[in-house]
Structure formats: structure tokens, C-alpha cells
Image (cartoon, rainbow, N blue to C red):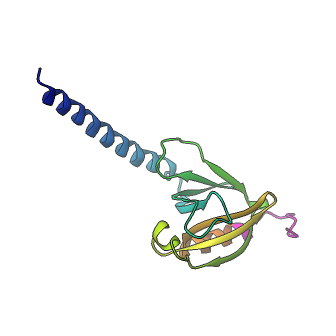
Amino acid sequence: MPVWLTLLDVAGALVALVILYGLALVVRRRVLSRHGGTFELSHRMRPGDEPGRGWLLGLGRYSGEQLEWFRIFTLSPRPKRAWTRGSLAYERSREPEGLERNVLYPDHVVVECETASGPVDLAMGRESLTGFQAWLESRPPGTDWSH
């Protein structure tokens, strides 16, 4: 068999794998959002870096007392990060600066939060920010509001 036919078979197999990966990502997103409460949410893995560095695109999902964050281009059904409502404090929001405008989803704002383990930077749409603030403020009765 000629070499070009082998290369053609390999290229066809690679294209099929890419298509299957894409379909798996679509199915995963549908499964994650089947109960509602999901939205586009980016997370800065290394807060404090220069603007535009350390951001990863993803999906956020409210699950009871937790905000779960899933990376967008992975097939894992488990969240990469999760924050409990009681440990997350909203500090401020701002417009993306410099490279952040190119790295983040269009029309997203950067949300700076504080946890016991340090700062957390998130980016979400303005509508999602309103929902996020409402979720944080709707803590159950008897909650300690001092933090």
C-alpha cells in the first residue's frame, strides 16, 4: 500500500477524533446545564498576575450552597473548582483591562472576590453578575453576615 494512502487514513482518523471530541464537549455542556443555573464563567487561576494572564474559560453552575466551576475544554464531569456561598465575599467588579479584553468572553466584567484562602478573580456577563450577587445575598436564616 502506498505511503500516501496510509497518511490519508491517519488524517481521516484524526479528523474523526476531533469531531468526536467536539460532540463530547457539546453533550457534556448539555448534561451540566440540564438542571439550569449554568452560565459562562471564567476563572483566573493565579490572581495577582498581570492583566490577561492566568484566565481559563469555563462554565459556572450553582449547586445548592456551592458555585462550581468547570473548564470549558475538558471532558471531566466534575468541577475543577468549587466555592461555598458562606466563604465567598464579593469585593468589586471592573471592566477588563489590556489583554483581558481579548482573553475573556465578550461583554464580561471581572469580579474580584475574597475567600479565607485568598483572592478569587472571576469573569462573567452583567446579567450573571446580578444573579451571582443575589445568590451571595440569599444566605439561609441564621447565617453569620460578618464575613
- Any magenta on residue 63? no
Q: Is residue 104 above or below residue 45?
A: below
- Answer whether residue 17 is visible to the viewer in this image: yes
Assign the magenta stretch its main secondary structure. loop
Numbered range of the magenta stretch: 136-147
**Quadrant for the N terminus in the image:** top left
Q: Residue furthest left?
A: 2
Q: Residue at x 53, y 51 (%)?
A: 71
Q: Is residue 90 above or below residue 10?
A: below
- Any magenta on residue 142? yes
Question: How many badges with numbers are in the image?
Answer: 0
Residue 101 in the image: x percent, y percent?
49, 73
Residue 16 in the image: x percent, y percent?
27, 37
Which is nearer the eye, 2 or 60? Answer: 2
Q: Residue at x 48, y 42 (%)?
A: 75
**Quadrant for the C terminus in the image:** bottom right
Q: Residue at x 71, y 68 (%)?
A: 113
Residue 87 in the image: x percent, y percent?
78, 60
Dividing the picture into quarters, in which one does residue 37 lie? Answer: bottom right
Which is nearer the eye, 8 or 56? Answer: 8
Residue 53 in the image: x percent, y percent?
57, 63
